[in-house]
Image (cartoon, rainbow, N blue to C red):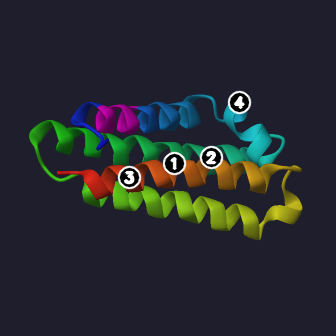
C-alpha cells in the first residue's frame, strides 16, 4: 500500500515534533545517544532540532501546496545516514548500545522516508 498524503504528513509532523523536543528538552533526548548532557551536546542537539523543525516544516508546507516533498525527504534521509555514520565513527566515546540504537532508529527513519519518496506524487 502506498503512503497517502495523510501518512506523509504524519511522518513529517512526527519529525517536526522530534525536532521541537531536541530544541526544548535536549537533555531528555540525548542521554542514551550521547551520554550525560553538557553544554556542547545541548548546542549540537538544538542545532539538529532546528534543522529537523525547519526541514520537515517546509516539507509539510510543500505537501499542503501540492509541491514536491521529495527534495526535503532526500535531505532528511541524508541527515539520518550522517547521524548513523557519525555515531558509529565516535562509538568508543558513546554509551554502550548507542551505535546500535542509532542504526535502528535513524535507519528506520531513513527507510520510512525512502518509502514515502518512492511513492510520493
Q: Are marks 3 and 4 in contact (CB under 8 Å)?
A: no
Q: Quadrant of the N terminus?
A: top left
| Disc 4 from disc 2: Cα separation | 16 Å
Q: Main secondary structure of the magenta part?
A: helix
Residue sitting at the far front: 1
Q: Residue at x 16, y 36 (%)?
A: 64
Q: Position of residue 18 (x, y in %)?
A: 52, 35
Q: Nearer the viewer, mark 1 or mark 4?
A: 1
Q: Give, as a single range, the part of the protein colored magenta.
A: 7-13
Q: Earlier in the sequence, mark 3 or mark 4?
A: 4
Q: Position of residue 31 (x, y in %)?
A: 78, 38
Q: Residue at x 27, y 45 (%)?
A: 59
| Disc 3 from disc 1: Cα separation | 10 Å
The quadrant where residue 57 appears: top left
Q: Are marks 2 and 1 in contact (CB under 8 Å)?
A: yes
Could you say which disc has been placed on residue 105 in the image? 2
Quick one: label 3, few (<14), some, or many (20+) residues within 10 Å?
some
Q: Position of residue 97 (x, y in %)?
A: 84, 49
Q: Position of residue 7 (x, y in %)?
A: 32, 33
**Which residue position is annotated with label 4?**
28
Q: Residue at x 49, y 38 (%)?
A: 19
Amino acid at each position: 500500500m502506498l503512503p497517502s498524503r495523510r501518512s506523509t504528513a504524519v511522518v513529517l509532523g512526527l519529525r517536526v515534533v522530534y525536532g521541537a523536543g531536541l530544541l526544548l528538552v535536549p537533555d531528555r533526548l540525548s542521554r542514551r545517544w550521547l551520554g550525560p548532557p553538557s553544554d556542547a551536546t545541548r548546542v549540537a542537539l538544538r542545532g539538529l532540532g532546528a534543522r529537523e523543525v525547519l526541514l520537515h516544516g517546509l516539507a509539510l508546507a510543500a505537501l499542503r501546496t501540492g509541491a514536491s516533498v521529495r527534495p526535503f525527504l532526500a535531505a532528511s534521509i541524508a541527515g539520518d545516514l550522517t547521524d548513523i555514520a557519525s555515531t558509529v565513527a565516535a562509538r568508543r566515546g558513546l554509551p554502550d548500545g548507542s551505535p546500535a540504537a542509532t542504526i535502528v532508529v535513524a535507519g528506520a527513519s531513513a527507510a520510512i522516508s525512502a518509502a514515502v519518496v518512492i511513492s510520493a506524487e
